[in-house]
Image (cartoon, rainbow, N blue to C red):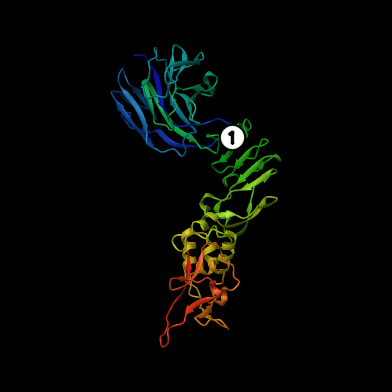
Amino acid sequence: MNKACFMPLVFVCAMSAGATEPTYDKFLTGVNSVSDGGVPSAVGGSWSISSTTLSKAGGAVAFDTGDSGTMKLDVSAEPADTNTIVKVELVATLADVGELSDPLSSSKTAFAVCTNAYHAWTGSSWVVLGEVPAGVDDTISTNLTVEISYQGSSARKARFTVGDTVLGGGWVVLTDTASSNLAGIGMSGSGTLAKADASVMLGIAEYDGVKYGTLADAVEEAAKDVTKTIEVLRETNENVTLPDGAKIADNGNVKGVVTVPENASVEVQPKAAEFVSTTGADVGTSGSYTVPVNVSGGTVNVKLPDSMSNKEIVGTPSRSGSTISLTIQTATSVLEGAKPDGAKALTNDIAKLRAYLSSHTNDAYVAAGVTSASIAEALAAPRENGLPLYQSYALGIEPEDPVKPVSVPSDSDGSNITLAIPSLSDKTPSGDYTIKYKVGDTVQEGGASSIKIPLPAAGAGTSTAVKICFE
């Protein structure tokens, strides 16, 4: 058969070209070594070869699949990203196959030389990319780069570069839309293969569901529609200027300078490490902090790290030059979820609850790892007056205020003993409970200031209990 090289490439991933160079992470080395018998080994994948003649040609594999042989490199490595761009770099001979045939059904795209022209497989048909230049020696290994873009949910596309020449004027639209990563590389025909490496572009920023290899690319796309937010996914030192009205969430990853028009906004998310008050302190303890911000102009909003969802920002942070000062506190949702009696949360006046917690159980309240359960536990703990802290709060008293009933100074009731709880006089309950004072099962209409205990019969004692009920 004629000497030929035909390469169906099976992919599932994405990538894009930008003004500044994207970063690629290599995850596959297809020809790591070649045995004396011509069998290649791979790193990040494994070869599946049958009915194919192999031999060693220097550091390359000489192969001939014949009419029915197979030579496939299956990828096992997990790329560092998905839904960006996969770049496959091959060094192989690119001889004319004489006649085009459809590749394997699993092939998302393929490349071949036929009748002195370069061709690409779209997943359903072959398209011509251009003529082979005059004087090309198809027995000499050539650099072939195949880029497969899987950005967003729209149709996938591929770009083919031979040497330094991009073929066909750019990207070729593929019929596949479901793939998200590279599955394998196949060879058919006869020729030599010295390299078959694959790298994935790292998504630096995402806009409208599409990842970009540089922040600048995402900003350029955002200029077309400023209604959505640019999400910065990885650290970048790029300096960019936002278009009017654009929004960006830096997620703690912007290390360059973002220049913002006056009517644009930036959502800055500092790294969790910025929220350490003193050496050795836990990350995220409630308090005041100053964090760096690389933004010039515009409006800056601060979002706490995802790991600090139990905290919230108090008021509006203040910005001065390249820093922002802000105060964080335990999130309202944490307090609303705390049920010290196992059934009811103290939600009537959250500001009042915060002040009480700060005064009487501050360590639990400001803790970096505060939870609804830890707040509930602190509120349920008995304090100096014998009551759980939450009951003192509900009564409107301090935890050291006694709640033992005492006789009133002047009692003119001849049928009852009148008692009172002085510490509760003129106090305003929190409003979270309906508070009742009972003697036995009888509710006292006079509240804490007039508790009536019936006088016992002549010669009898009394042990009637006074109860404070929280309903």
Name the quadrant of the N terminus.
top left
Q: Is residue 135 above or below residue 419?
A: above
Q: How many residues crowd around disc 1 within 10 Å: few (fewer than 14), some, or many (20 or more)?
A: many
193 relative position to 242: left or right: left
At 42% from the left edge and 31% from the top edge, which residue is drawn? 182
Q: Is there any visible trace of residue 447 in the rendered image?
A: yes
Q: Position of residue 138 (x, y in %)?
A: 44, 17
Q: Is residue 164 above or below residue 406?
A: above
Q: Secondary structure at mark 1?
A: helix
Q: Position of residue 233 (x, y in %)?
A: 54, 41
Q: Amino acid at mark 1?
A: Ala
Query: Relative to the observer, which residue lies in front, 133 or 282?
Result: 282
Q: Is there any visible trace of residue 278 in the rendered image?
A: no
Q: Position of residue 37 (x, y in %)?
A: 30, 29
Q: Quadrant location of residue 169?
A: top right
Looking at the rendered structure, the number of numbered marks drawn on it comes to 1
Q: Is residue 459 above or below residue 346?
A: below
Query: Relative to the observer, which residue lies in front, 14 or 397?
Result: 397
At 68% from the left edge and 44% from the top edge, which residue is drawn? 299
Q: Position of residue 382 (x, y in %)?
A: 47, 71
Q: Quadrant location of residue 35?
A: top left
46 relative position to 468: left or right: left
Task: From the image, tell me which residue sits under label 1.
Answer: 218
Residue furthest to the bottom in view is 459
